[in-house]
Amino acid sequence: MMFANDIIKGGVDTNQIQFYNFEDLDILSIGDIYQIHTHIKKGLINDKMNYIFLDEVQNIKDFQLLVDSLYIKPNVDIYITGSNAYMLSGELATLLTGRYVEINLLPLQFAEYYNFISSKSPNLSKNEILANYIHFGGIPEYVKQLSISEKQADLFAHSILKTIIEKDIFKRLNITNKHDFNKILDFILDSVGSYVSPRSISDTLRSNGTIVDKQTVAKYLDALCEAYLIYKVPRFEIKGKGLLQTLNKYYIVDPCFAKVRLKKSIIKDRSHWLGNMVYLELFRRNKEVFIGKRNNLEVDFVVIDYNDYTSYYQVAWTTENPGTLERELASLRAIKDSTPKYLITTDIDFNPVYDGIRKLNVIDWLLSHNPNNTL
């Protein structure tokens, strides 16, 4: 609806827009795909572009035939949304023969969250808002529920997480061994930003009395990624310019899910969750994000932007200790080229530069990107 309103603000007349929510029984009562197709055609403006929005389209049997038929009309721009359980990327490509652009929506980025919170609570400092964002995340409804109570917000997050697991994973993939799956999910949520592999997870679970083979672990990890609950970040050999097949890191789409699932504060592991936040921001802004490796040194993130330029990022909560600063700089210093290199921390020290490596305050870096230009 926000996007439709944005189109109207851009000069499109309201009669050029048709919006159908197929969770509404009044809309479903129009009939099958042929009757819906006829209904939409009657509302088209012949000499203008028409914008058709089909919400929760998976509720219509054979919806792909309807979408394909509308797609081939020269004066129709069509947008569809639906549950992950029916519209995961690979399945959508099969249904719609690849003729679509996929837009993935993430929770609020910090700049959006900051604008909202600072308007509601002007007395909160930037550091307090950052701490809340790292702890509670940026799912809009969760943030709204927090104004009622944290307990209410946690109940909402738990219900969303349960829906994702039950509908988008268990039901879609017909997973019956829910106990083992939940063990793996808990392991990943408790290991955010750490190196793991299906074998290492299998071995760790075995040592704790749960036997799950690495193939099953890999299947479950793929399912979590396909449901957009976690993101797999592979390792990139900086010197060899190629992907490494062993050990990846996983980041979660929003920390509130770990908070309600693990029932413990994530503040104690704040450096990893800072890394989770930075990863998601880099993911929003760039084409590809990897974990970097050069010899025995690790670089937190190797980033390739939409112009195919590379940059490197190291993340640390603080480098006020000189030894910590030298350790964090070492990985970037080992890269002997002119590629932009950044060290992101919560420190406030006016963005110093060390041998070409620019140190940035994370809040300044997060607020430097205009969220209105991300799409």
Image (cartoon, rainbow, N blue to C red):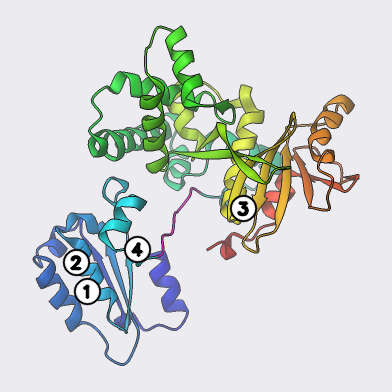
- In the image, 327: left or right of 199? right
Could you tell me if the residues under marks 2 and 4 are in contact, i.e. CB atoms within 8 Å? Answer: no
Which segment did they paint magenta? 101-107
Q: CA distance from mark 3 to mark 4?
A: 33 Å
Q: CA distance from mark 2 to mark 4?
A: 13 Å
Please tell me how crowded label 4 is: few (under 14), some (14-19), or many (20+) other residues with Cα within 10 Å: few
- In the image, 336: left or right of 169? right
| Helix, strand or loop under label 1 | helix
- The answer to whether 73 is drawn above or below residue 192 in the figure is below
Magenta stretch contains residue 102: yes
Q: Say which of marks 1 and 3 sits in front.
A: 1
**Residue 20 figure quarter:** bottom left
Residue 22 visible, this angle: yes
Q: Which mark is residue 65?
A: 2
Residue 158: x and y, percent?
A: 37, 31
Which residue matches tag 1?
69
User: Residue drawn at (9%, 63%), measured in percent from left and top?
Assistant: 29
- In the image, 5: left or right of 316? left
| Helix, strand or loop under label 4 | loop
In the image, 226 versus 130, the foreground residue is: 226
